[in-house]
Image (cartoon, rainbow, N blue to C red):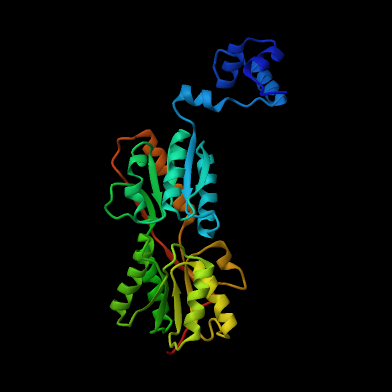
Amino acid sequence: MGFVTLKDVAKVAGVSYATVSRALSGSPEIGENTRKRVIRICEEMGYTPNAVARSMVMKRTNILGLIVTSLNNPFMSEMTAHIEIYARQCGYNLMVCNSSYDRELEKEVFSLLVSRKVDGVIMIPVGNESYDALKTLTAQVPTVFIGENMQDLPENYVSVDNAAGMQHATEYLYGLGHRKILYLGARENSMTHKLRVGGYLTACERLGIAPHVLNNTSPRSSFEVGYALADAYFAGTHDETAVLCAADTLAIGVIKAAYERGVRIPEDISLMGFDNLSFSALPPIDLTTVNQPKQALAAAAVDMLLNRIKNPDAPYTKTILSPSVVERSSCRRTDA
């Protein structure tokens, strides 16, 4: 049996095509008993509305696009889940695309979403260059960037205050007595990470302590990168009493490298991350970190996009949410 159409439903129900259409659209011209019977028959026959035809009539699809850099990244997967749930609560479905940290692919999947007539796009960009590269596409569909603080660029975006988050983290470690704090994982290709390391450097200057930064030359902040950086660091001479990671994923790599090198956390060195991913609270990890309010970020991004869809000529808007330190057991007080 092929697709069930409105005409098929009308034939079984013994009513006209127009009656079925009105029953499904909630028209007051149809009696409640007729409406219930038509809906019951639709369910029994497995009828599904023709979304393409409906979108042509309604001039909208009720579908939002989401572009993330990698669903393998726990932060991205958690954000995707929150965005999908909230968008559905608002009456929208979500079409998710993965750019794989590739700017050409990022442009390709954005073009795909535009061609599928999504009502709007939320995206976590590959890097700073994404904004200029996507200008011709963002001009065609309401777009909200999430995760990157874009300063004064004429774009809609939602972000956590990354600089303030790292300032708080550095001050937290300083308050525990740490005066030699390694910052691990600074990335030049990301405004997010520029702001985070900037917050660390600002706090170091204000607190009067010497900064020490290990850069991440990879386009992503991963477990593997954290492990490689930490393994090389632990293999050499080091006197820092705390490691502050640019992301929780990096911190997990640090934990593995420390274990293999016989470095105890927090007895020998304290460890702190950024993001507060769900696995960071697991008992074997119990990572002290900076919380990004992911559910609030997701809701703010969807709300901003829906407002942009309804008011396409409204001024560009930005929302910056406050981060907070989450204390667990990976940091200890020291007299060093």
Indicate the position of residue 104 as horizontal and vertical percent values: 42, 49
Quadrant of the image containing the C terminus: bottom left
Q: Residue at x 37, y 38 (%)?
A: 308
Q: Residue furthest left?
A: 152
Q: Residue at x 49, y 78 (%)?
A: 230
Is residue 214 or residue 7 the one in the foreground? 214
Residue 207 visible at all: yes
Is residue 177 or residue 247 the one in the foreground? 247
Q: Quadrant of residue 37?
A: top right
Q: Quadrant of residue 51?
A: top right
Q: Residue at x 38, y 64 (%)?
A: 193
Is residue 124 or residue 216 the one in the foreground? 216
Image label count? 0
312 vs 133: above or below: above
Q: Quadrant of residue 286?
A: bottom right
Indicate the position of residue 148 as horizontal and vertical percent values: 38, 56
Q: Residue at x 45, y 53 (%)?
A: 102
